Image (cartoon, rainbow, N blue to C red):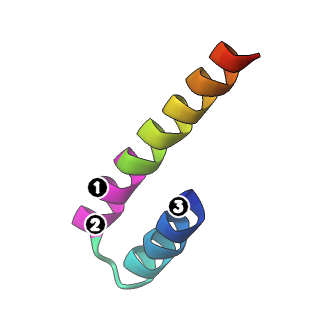
Amino acid sequence: MIRLQRELLTCAADSDDEGTVALVSGYITEQEKQLWMLSAYLS
């Protein structure tokens, strides 16, 4: 999922779509944080 969002982020950045870049960056940041917390909890 994060990989696809990174591809979307690249496409949005190439299109100079700053709104989408900001939105997707926020989603990626939150998902990475949740993934880290889940991994830490399960370890």
SS at badge 3: loop
Left or right of 6, for residue 43: right
SS at badge 1: helix
**First in residue order: circle 3 vs circle 1:** 3
Q: Which mark is residue 1?
A: 3
Quick check: is 19 in the magenta stretch? yes
Residue drawn at x 52%, y 61% as measured from the top left: 1
Judging by the rendered image, the residue that carries numbered circle 1 is 23
Judging by the rendered image, the residue that carries numbered circle 2 is 20
Farthest right residue?
A: 43
Please say if the residues under marks 1 and 2 sit with CB atoms less than 8 Å apart: yes
Tell me residue 9's x, y (percent): 45, 68
Residue drawn at x 59%, y 65% as measured from the top left: 3
Please say if the residues under marks 2 and 3 sit with CB atoms less than 8 Å apart: no
Tell me residue 10's x, y (percent): 50, 74
Magenta region: which residues? 18-26
Residue drawn at x 53%, y 65% as measured from the top left: 6
- The span from disc 3 to disc 1 (Cα, nearest Å) is 15 Å
Give the residue type that dot 2 points to.
Answer: Thr
